[in-house]
């Protein structure tokens, strides 16, 4: 019996949605296929028509998110500036923030963070002719790690501040440095 593509895609998506719902709450080691199947409203055997195991879902979703980031038009454009890249990362968080926060959070996959930073480094190396040395890679990992953490914090905190104010803060952190920006924000004459 041939299933209609729309039905199989919908079933696959229900499985993925159930996975994310559970992964947001539990470490992957505590999630069972039985729970995913029950949450998705399918039989356990149906799960295996789409995925080998729970780690297969996570791997496919990580691959999907990385591909989306790498294909993001503003991030990969040849004339991208660091400011444009920040705006692009903001857009990526707006569309995939929930998943990024889970993968980069306490229950997430540590190897995903490393892979994501390495892929982003590769893009910036091409766009900005960065030297291929340990100091440059260290500086980049420090910077992108801070950016990802700031975006994750912003996304999870349901920000009351306007988006442009957040982007201005990120730009100040990059252009003026962390300690200078914090000192400026802490000064009594700092205007909100």
Image (cartoon, helix red, strand yellow):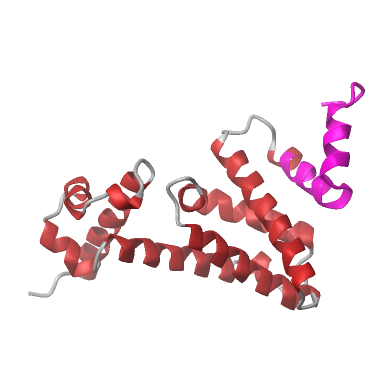
- Residue lying furthest top in this view? 188
Assign the N terminus to one quadrant of the image.
Answer: bottom left
Residue at (54%, 38%) from the top-left corner?
Answer: 156
Is 154 located above or below residue 2 in the figure? Answer: above
Q: Position of residue 61 (x, y in %)?
A: 40, 62
Instruction: Please say whether residue 189 is one of the residues in the magenta stretch.
Output: yes
Residue 16 occupies which quadrant of the picture?
A: bottom left
Residue at (62%, 33%) from the top-left corner?
Answer: 159
Residue 161 occupies which quadrant of the picture?
A: top right
Is 120 located above or below residue 101 in the figure? Answer: below
Position of 24 with respect to 164 (left or right) is: left
- Residue range highlighted in magenta: 166-192
Q: Position of residue 49 (x, y in %)?
A: 18, 69
Q: Position of residue 30 (x, y in %)?
A: 28, 47
Q: Position of residue 44 (x, y in %)?
A: 13, 57
Instruction: Please say whether residue 113 is one of the residues in the magenta stretch.
Output: no
């Amino acid at each position: 019996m041939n299933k209609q593509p729309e039905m199989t895609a919908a079933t696959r998506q229900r499985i993925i949605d159930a996975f994310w719902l559970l992964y947001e709450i539990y470490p992957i080691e505590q999630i069972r296929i039985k729970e995913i199947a029950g949450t998705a409203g399918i039989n356990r055997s149906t799960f295996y028509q789409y995925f080998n195991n729970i780690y297969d879902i996570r791997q496919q979703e990580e691959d999907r998110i990385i591909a989306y980031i790498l294909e993001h038009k503003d991030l990969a454009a040849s004339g991208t500036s660091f400011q444009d890249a920040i705006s692009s990362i903001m857009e990526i968080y707006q569309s995939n923030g929930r998943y990024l926060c889970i993968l980069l959070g306490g229950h997430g996959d540590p190897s995903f963070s490393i892979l994501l930073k390495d892929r982003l480094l590769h893009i910036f190396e091409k766009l900005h002719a960065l030297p291929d040395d340990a100091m440059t890679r260290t500086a980049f990992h420090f910077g992108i790690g801070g950016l990802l953490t700031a975006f994750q914090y912003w996304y999870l905190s349901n920000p009351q501040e306007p988006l442009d104010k957040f982007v201005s803060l990120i730009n100040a952190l990059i252009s003026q440095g962390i300690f200078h920006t914090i000192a400026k924000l802490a000064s009594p004459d700092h205007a909100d």
